[in-house]
Image: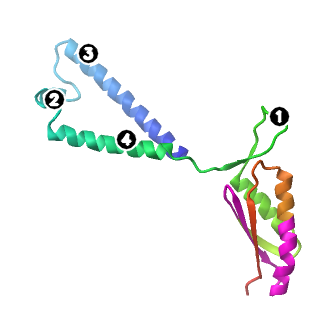
Amino acid sequence: MRLVNRPLAFILAAALAVAAIIIIIEVIAVAVHHGPLLLHWTTWYRWASKTRWDQLVIQVWSAVLIVIGAAILAVELKPRRVTRLPLRSGHDATHAAVTRRGLAGALRAAATGVDGVSAAVVTVRRRRARITATAASRGRAATEALRQPVTQALQDRLDGLDLRHPPHLRVRVNSRSR
């Protein structure tokens, strides 16, 4: 959501700055007894002075703005996706973390470092890491023989990183396709 918030905040700030400048210009124009310069606000003023708060148009626009505001609030209050997994540290003032993408790369390197594994696809979530390794040879015997070494290499890599809450490993070894 941070990627969307920054441009929206910039657009809102620019719109507020332009609106403030226009209001300043219009106030100065009224002070020197000149008519509206940029906006014909006098028609809006007349309409607003005739319109009561309990009219339908005011109720509809209020409902629309409340729904939009509630939707924006709900989106902003939704917890963000965890992108960093915290590491244990020896000191309370030290906070370190590894990104899910970085952990996926480390696990991929550990899996492909095992003899007989040609490739690995890694998906890291907050509580689970799913690794699908591809054996260099064909056959069920080759994949079954690689399962334990790949799992052990991945577990050693996770233990070496010393994550505060390490994800559970789900390892699958597939044989090479034709």
Label 4, residues with CA under 10 Å away: few <14, some 14-19, many ≥20: few
Q: CA distance from mark 1 to mark 4?
A: 42 Å
Q: Is residue 145 magenta?
A: yes
Quick check: 173 above or below 165?
below
Question: Identity of the amino acid at label 3?
Answer: Ile
Circle nearer the N terminus (1, 2): 2
Q: CA distance from mark 4 to mark 3?
A: 33 Å
Dots 1, 2 in contact, CB < 8 A: no
Q: CA distance from mark 2 to mark 3?
A: 22 Å
Q: Nearer the viewer, residue 42 or 153?
A: 153
Q: In this rendering, would 150 be left or right of 73?
A: right
Q: Secondary structure at mark 1?
A: loop
Q: CA distance from mark 2 to mark 4?
A: 23 Å
Label 3, residues with CA under 10 Å away: few <14, some 14-19, many ≥20: some
Residue marked by disc 3? 28
Residue marked by disc 2? 48
Dots 2, 4 in contact, CB < 8 A: no
Residue marked by disc 1? 91
Location of residue 67 by image quarter:
top left
Residue marked by disc 4? 69
x%, y% of residue 39? 22, 29
Q: Which residues are magenta?
A: 123-152
Q: Is residue 70 magenta?
A: no
x%, y% of residue 56? 15, 41
